[in-house]
Image: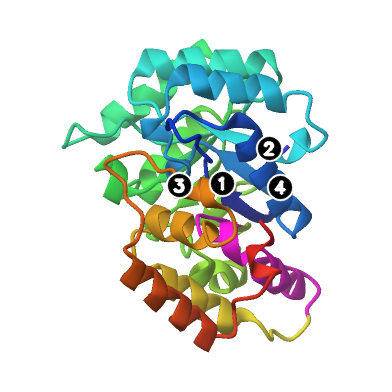
Amino acid sequence: MLKRGVYAASLSVLNKDLTLNVEATISHAENLIKNGLHGCFFFGSTGMSQLISKNEKMELISKISTHKQRKHFYLGTGCNSLNENIELIKYASEFNFNTILLMPSAYYVGNSDEGVFEFYKKIILACPKIKIVIYNFQKLSGYIFSIDAITKLVKSFPKNIIGVKDSSYNLYENLKIKNFLIFPGSEAKLLKGLEKGSSGVISAVTNSTHFLARKVFDDFENKIPQTKNDQLISVRETFDGYNLISALHSFHSIKDENYKNILPPLTLLSEQKLKKLIEKLNKLKFISEKTLAA
């Protein structure tokens, strides 16, 4: 069961032919957990989920079902089609993966509150065991959740709508629902969110900041004075200066060339941009073997 904590929207590692390297993708997530994260979400936006085939996702789901870290693994769908979402969620449920990070269908501009409610309603009716973490990210979906829209969904489906990943940052400071998990989508909001009652973070950049983010979270939980939050925010803001998927794959490719494999239209950073990123991170005293451990 999903709990308070620090989570990654985990990277997907590809083969040279740009198919999903299932074993390497799982190994990446396993290393993140060993280095401090409470868990990982496969096939969030950072995992190139919209660009990876359903069959590849199903192969990974079947593989992680017997993994020793399976209780720390969670799933997104990355599907626009209602029926494909339902099919993938039902498949995951066969392996008792029921906690799903779920964004409304993207592409069609002008999604309404009514239409988005129907989207979640139909999925819940088809997949009654599902535990949904709503993915609020207007930049990708074209729709932003209001407090009223979230509240209506929770009241209508209290056993199914368990939380929100807030990457639009319009909810985490003011949304107050009992026993409801709220995760801002950036480490830069982690401590502020915790102080406002949030549950932790689900972030792209925790693929790299895992140990720092966990330190900030643990120190808050244990009422210890913060010593790493300023560095954590600065590192996150540095990565925010680039396309996150491009920057993270480029950064991890320093240690492992498999991360150079990336699905078009995404691209790696240019050599000049990667050099600049490394210079900035070095100034923040962030680069180390521990940093690149995952």
Q: What residue would you read off at disc 3?
A: 46
Task: Tell me if residue 204 is in the magenta stretch.
Answer: yes
Provide the residue span drawn in magenta. Answer: 201-223
Q: Are marks 1 and 3 in contact (CB under 8 Å)?
A: yes
- Mark 3 closeness class: few <14, some 14–19, many ≥20 residues within 10 Å: many
Q: Which mark is residue 10?
A: 1
Q: Nearer the viewer, mark 4 or mark 2?
A: 2
Name the secondary structure under disc 2: strand
What is the total number of numbered labels drawn onto the structure image?
A: 4
Residue under label 4, please give it: 3
Q: Three-letter amino acid code at disc 2?
A: Phe
Pointer 2 residue: 73
Q: Secondary structure at mark 1?
A: loop
- Are there few (<14), some (14-19), or many (20+) residues within 10 Å of tag 4? few
262 vs 68, left or right, is: left
Going from N to C along the chain, the mark reached first, 2 or 1, is 1
Tell me which numbered mark, 3 or 4, is placed earlier along the sequence.
4
